[in-house]
Image: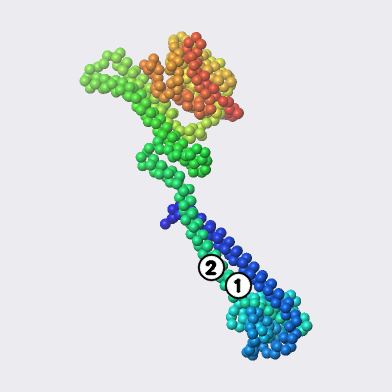
């Protein structure tokens, strides 16, 4: 079973502190050991200097037996003193604390193969640790003097130091674990709040919840909290827009569906009862059904366009000739308003956009101009330096209605009897904004409405293709 995050952080902190404390403790122990051994070595050098006047006398008069003969020693001191010969024998001085087991290095000093004094650690015959210094004896070849001091006090000091360091290290590790757990809890408290908020959203679908972030906080948790708040705000706005879209779509679909059902029921009842409808009325009913089906198809197409996400259009964006797009839209507009005069003054201009969506937006603008223009009037279309202007000579839009013209399903009270879903200009605004441009509706001088679309130019024109 995997440990919780706060437990892992506490364990990691305790492990890091344990490693650091262990490294410091071991380093401290070795430094103290080296310091104590250096003091003993200095004492050994001092003892060796005081033996200068005793060497030959003790060698000639006192050293007549080896330690293996069980020589009874006189008054003991804390210093071990003995002679080492080149053939590996050793002889203990009378005032020596005891005898020390010699090593091959001591024999090398006695034999002259090693000229420098030798410091070492050895055991006496009773198994006690001692620190030794072996130096050659210049008056006599093949003989060296070994001086040693006991390490009992030093080892005791080092053992006590090791125990103290071990105790301090244990307390430090336990304290570090507790501190690490406390720090982990404090540091993860914002994450706990975020987790609770996410669980609350998943459980209740309440997108109004917010995580409090103090002003000035800019750490990772604060940025995560702000991102979560921004995400829930966007989701709430998106859900509200979706619900509003569904409600508006249902409202807009209700009228044509009701009318369509009524007309179809009349035609069906006529067939069932055998009472024919007058031919003129029958043609009017069929024309009405056809118009309503066309209106429903257009409304569904508009809803599909509005429901498409940004990612769905990303791969379709390309460099498009705005002049050709407007020209194609003009041909369709002239078919829908044959009684109107539509003039065009177009200059080449290239933009980055989705071709189908851009043409649909231009068609929507021209359809509105055709729909609201009186018979035999003129619709003027110009394209100059990336600015598309469409001016009609219709009744215009009241000033108090201009702020709402790009809202979804919004329709002017005076135009609600005309065909349309109220989504055309909303699609225009969406397409233009996605292409980095701007669109505006303003009253035209002398009456009518002027639609202005500004689109940034593309870096290069589209590549030409030849069949």
* Quadrant where the N terminus is found in the figure: bottom left
Percent across and percent down for residue 441 are 48, 18
What's the residue at 60%, 72% (across, down)?
Answer: 154
Q: Which comes sooner in the sequence, label 2 or label 1?
A: 1
How are the residues colored?
Answer: rainbow
User: Does residue 254 appear in the picture of this structure?
Assistant: yes
Which residue is nearer to you in this view: 45 or 139?
Answer: 45
Residue at numbered disc 1: 154
**In this picture, residue 232 sits left or right of residue 126:** left
Residue furthest right as drawn: 139
Q: CA distance from mark 2 to mark 1?
A: 14 Å
Percent across and percent down for residue 7 are 45, 54
Compared to residue 171, the image places residue 304 above or below, namely above
Which residue is nearer to you in this view: 309 or 300?
Answer: 309
Compared to residue 360, the image places residue 183 above or below, namely below
Neighbourhood count class around disc 1 (C-alpha, 10 Å): few under 14, some 14–19, many 20 upward: some
Which residue is nearer to you in this view: 124 or 379?
Answer: 124
Element type at mark 2: helix
* Quadrant where the C terminus is found in the figure: top right
Element type at mark 1: helix
Among the 4 quarters of the image, the one containing residue 270: top left
Among the 4 quarters of the image, the one containing residue 114: bottom right
Percent across and percent down for residue 241 are 40, 30
Percent across and percent down for residue 32 are 62, 67
Residue at numbered disc 2: 163
What's the residue at 50%, 22% (across, down)?
Answer: 439
**In this picture, residue 323 sits left or right of residue 406:** right
Neighbourhood count class around disc 2 (C-alpha, 10 Å): few under 14, some 14–19, many 20 upward: few
What's the residue at 62%, 77% (across, down)?
Answer: 150
Compared to residue 408, the image places residue 44 above or below, namely below
């Amino acid at each position: 079973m995997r440990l919780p995050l706060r437990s892992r952080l506490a364990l990691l902190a305790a492990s890091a502190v344990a490693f650091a404390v262990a490294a410091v403790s071991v380093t401290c122990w070795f430094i103290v050991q080296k310091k104590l051994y250096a003091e003993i070595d200095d004492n050994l050098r001092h003892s060796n200097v005081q033996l200068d006047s005793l060497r030959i006398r003790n060698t000639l008069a006192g050293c007549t037996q080896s330690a293996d003969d069980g020589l009874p020693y006189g008054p003991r001191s804390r210093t071990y003193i003995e002679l080492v010969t080149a053939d590996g024998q050793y002889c203990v001085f009378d005032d020596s604390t005891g005898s020390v087991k010699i090593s091959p290095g001591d024999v090398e000093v006695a034999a002259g193969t090693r000229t420098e004094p030798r410091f070492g650690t050895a055991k006496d015959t009773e198994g006690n640790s001692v620190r030794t210094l072996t130096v050659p004896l210049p008056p006599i070849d093949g003989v060296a003097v070994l001086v040693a001091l006991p390490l009992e006090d030093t080892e005791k000091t080092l053992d006590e130091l090791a125990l103290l360091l071990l105790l301090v290290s244990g307390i430090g590790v336990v304290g570090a674990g507790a501190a690490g757990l406390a720090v982990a809890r404090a540091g993860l408290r914002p994450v706990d709040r975020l987790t609770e908020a996410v669980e609350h959203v998943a459980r209740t679908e309440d997108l109004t919840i917010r995580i409090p972030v103090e002003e000035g906080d800019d750490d990772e948790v604060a940025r995560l909290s702000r991102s979560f708040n921004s995400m829930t705000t966007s989701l709430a706005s998106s859900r509200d827009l979706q619900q509003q879209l569904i409600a508006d779509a249902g409202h807009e679909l209700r009228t044509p569906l009701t009318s369509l059902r009524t007309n179809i029921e009349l035609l069906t009842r006529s067939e069932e009862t055998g009472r024919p409808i007058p031919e003129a009325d029958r043609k009017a009913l069929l024309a009405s059904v056809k118009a309503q089906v066309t209106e429903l198809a257009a409304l569904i197409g508009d809803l599909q366009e509005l429901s498409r996400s940004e990612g769905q259009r990303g791969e379709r964006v390309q460099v498009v000739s705005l002049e050709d797009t407007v020209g194609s839209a003009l041909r369709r507009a002239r078919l829908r308003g044959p009684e109107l005069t539509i003039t065009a003054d177009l200059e080449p201009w290239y933009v980055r956009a989705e071709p189908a969506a851009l043409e649909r937006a231009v068609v929507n603008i021209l359809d509105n101009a055709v729909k609201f223009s009186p018979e035999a009037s003129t619709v003027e279309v110009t394209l100059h330096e990336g600015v598309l202007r469409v001016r009609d000579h219709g009744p215009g839009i009241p000033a108090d209605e201009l702020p709402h013209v790009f809202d979804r399903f919004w329709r002017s009270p005076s135009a609600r009897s005309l065909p349309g879903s109220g989504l055309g200009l909303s699609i225009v605004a969406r397409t233009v904004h996605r292409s980095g441009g701007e669109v505006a509706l303003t009253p035209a001088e002398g009456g009518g409405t002027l639609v202005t679309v500004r689109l940034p130019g593309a870096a290069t024109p589209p590549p030409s293709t030849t069949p």
